[in-house]
Image: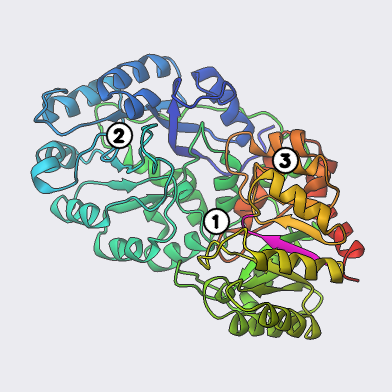
């Protein structure tokens, strides 16, 4: 019996061997189909990894071979500006795509070192606009000699808007590793261009799906996974558990992409019959069947409160947070202030104090510390916060432009040790540093803000360190952290108001680990620690 009630059409999959392939990621058509089966993905638009990393001509030829006789996999080609004479003229390329069932084109301007200016790409794009062939613009770079190959917010929004306005009939889709700090120009681009679309694995941001659906409509969004480097569970968790109508969810899941890819009337886009396997367990079945998370009793050890200059944060009032927790089965959430990370920690801590006093059974507040302050001021603010009901300490020297190894970090650890309480840090440094702190302050409960690789060897030798799960969106990361660190040492962190709660829960629900371990990660471990520390 097919469990899913949502037809998923993935807009962002790459096939074939690639430079940083570990040997585990699915790269063949058969392995990719098995992976899609597990995640309930019916079809996928695929571009060859070689078209991205090596050359368009070689990758475009190979993707036809890799997808041959695979009706669930729809090939896409990468394209280049024309002056180099590396590809056929644009009009001939479009005709070749139509003849060979190629459904979309990808531009990789940073990887191939070209601009989006009119003199560079307009001659190339004109025939695509005439036929309304979707063009995906991806600014990522995979060059190993580039220090910024994994960075975010690389989209040239001015260039994207210019293209959309020059070719208003051209469907343009932006996809990159992550859009985060560039949300405001992204919104302006959506406002300016009715033919602009975004792929959702690019947008792991709190309520961004909800906000875009409200303001510009669900037709602007396409589901994509980022396979094979990404775990589809994150993007699926974000979409499946988004607070939007079922009609909008279905459109984003696949209806919008199918409409865009149906430009070739001579070769209609067929809908293959797909029989998906049964879910592997009761938690895997929830997103597969569009079930509810209510009543699951999840706990989160990493959440933010308030607005921030770094991102646009919609639906950020305390009542909004409680509604989100209720909707997604989160019984309790550890919160600290956005304002205290890079601005006025006293103002931010007051916000957390007020929130905890309003919802004492649901919210657990941590004091945010600015390590630029004097030791006396740091101790005084921590004491003030604890006197007002806060329960732990939050550090983020990176955002404060401070030395993460500075003496005030050690001071805060010593205070946590005195109080036998929690201390969470965005960046503890290397494994030796973590081990040293945990051993010097054995009565403190140390937590990493994120899935720190350095913490894996550390948890093997110290008992008072726990690893936050944000993010688990890399391929096989959940399974690897459970295997190498142990499910007992992982604590779910939603990163609420920065990231979607469903985005954080999804990889654990879909993970190929046992249900008791999933439940430990999603709440059991935090419940145990709350009974052990700072009582």
- What residue appears at the point 63 percent right and 50 percent down from the top-left corner? 429
When the figure is inspected, residue 120 is found, relative to residue 70, above or below; the finding is: below
Sequence-wise, the earlier of marks 2 and 3 is 2
Tell me the mark number nearer the camera, choosing from 2 and 1.
2
426 falls in the magenta region: yes
The residue to which callout 2 is attached is 104
Spatial CA span between label 2 and label 1: 27 Å
Mark number for residue 456?
3
Camera-nearest residue between 27 and 484: 484
530 falls in the magenta region: no
Spatial CA span between label 2 and label 3: 41 Å
Mark number for residue 246?
1
Residue 511 appears in the picture as rendered: no
Q: Secondary structure at mark 1?
A: helix
Camera-nearest residue between 162 and 291: 162
Badge 1: few (under 14), some or many (20 or more) residues near its Cα, within 10 Å? few
Q: Which residues are magenta?
A: 421-427
Left or right placement of residue 125 versus residue 7 in this view: left
Camera-nearest residue between 161 and 335: 335
When the figure is inspected, residue 95 is found, relative to residue 484, above or below; the finding is: above
- Percent position of residue 199, x then y: 41, 47
Spatial CA span between label 3 and label 1: 40 Å
Tell me the mark number nearer the camera, choosing from 2 and 3.
3
- What residue appears at the point 58 percent right and 58 percent down from the top-left corner? 500
Residue 185 appears in the picture as rendered: yes
Q: Secondary structure at mark 3?
A: helix
Sequence-wise, the earlier of marks 3 and 1 is 1
- Percent position of residue 268, x then y: 32, 30
Quarter occupied by the C terminus? bottom right
Q: Which residue is farthest front?
A: 407
């Amino acid at each position: 019996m097919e469990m899913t009630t949502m037809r998923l059409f993935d807009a962002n999959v790459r096939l074939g061997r690639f430079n940083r392939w570990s040997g585990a990621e699915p790269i063949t058509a058969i392995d990719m189909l098995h992976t899609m089966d597990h995640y309930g993905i019916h079809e996928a638009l695929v571009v060859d990894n070689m078209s991205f990393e090596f050359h368009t001509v070689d990758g475009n030829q190979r993707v036809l071979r890799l997808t041959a006789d695979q009706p669930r996999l729809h090939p896409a080609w990468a394209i280049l500006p024309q002056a180099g004479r590396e590809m056929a003229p644009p009009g001939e390329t479009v005709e070749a795509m139509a003849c060979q069932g190629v459904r979309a084109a990808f531009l990789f301007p940073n990887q191939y070192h070209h601009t989006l200016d009119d003199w560079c790409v307009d001659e190339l794009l004109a025939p695509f606009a005439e036929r309304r062939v979707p063009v995906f613009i991806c600014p990522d770079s995979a060059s190993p000699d580039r220090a910024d190959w994994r960075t975010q917010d690389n989209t040239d929004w001015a260039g994207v808007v210019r293209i959309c306005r020059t070719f208003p009939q051209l469907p343009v889709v932006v996809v990159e590793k992550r859009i985060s700090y560039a949300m405001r120009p992204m919104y302006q681009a959506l406002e300016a261009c009715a033919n602009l679309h975004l792929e959702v694995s690019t947008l792991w941001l709190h309520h961004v799906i909800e906000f875009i659906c409200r303001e510009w409509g669900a037709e602007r969004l396409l589901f994509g996974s980022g396979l094979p480097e990404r775990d589809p569970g994150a993007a699926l968790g974000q979409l499946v558990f988004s607070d939007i109508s079922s009609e909008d969810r279905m459109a984003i899941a696949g209806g919008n992409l199918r409409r865009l890819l149906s430009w070739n009337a001579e070769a209609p886009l067929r809908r293959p019959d797909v029989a998906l396997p049964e879910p592997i367990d009761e938690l895997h079945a929830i997103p597969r069947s569009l079930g509810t998370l209510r009543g699951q009793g999840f706990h989160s050890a990493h959440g933010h409160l308030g607005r921030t200059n770094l991102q646009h944060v919609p639906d950020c009032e305390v009542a909004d947070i409680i509604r989100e927790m209720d909707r997604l089965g989160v019984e309790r959430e550890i919160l600290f202030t956005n304002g205290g990370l890079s601005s006025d920690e006293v103002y931010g801590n007051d916000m957390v104090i007020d929130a905890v006093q309003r919802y004492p059974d649901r919210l657990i507040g941590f004091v945010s510390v600015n390590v630029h302050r004097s030791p006396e001021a740091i101790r005084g603010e921590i004491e003030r916060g604890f006197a007002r009901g806060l329960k732990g300490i939050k550090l983020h020297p990176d955002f404060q432009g401070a030395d993460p190894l500075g003496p005030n970090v050690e001071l805060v650890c010593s205070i946590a040790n005195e109080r036998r309480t929690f201390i969470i840090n965005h960046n503890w440094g290397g494994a030796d540093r973590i081990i040293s702190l945990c051993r010097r302050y054995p009565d403190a409960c140390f937590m990493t803000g994120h899935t720190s690789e350095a913490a894996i060897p550390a948890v093997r030798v110290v008992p008072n360190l726990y690893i936050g799960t944000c993010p688990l969106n890399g391929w096989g990361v959940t399974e690897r952290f459970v295997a190498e660190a142990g499910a007992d040492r992982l604590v779910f962190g939603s990163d609420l108001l920065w990231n979607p709660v469903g985005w954080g829960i999804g990889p654990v629900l879909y993970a190929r680990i046992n249900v008791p371990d999933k439940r430990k990660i999603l709440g059991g471990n935090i419940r145990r620690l709350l009974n052990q520390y700072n009582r």
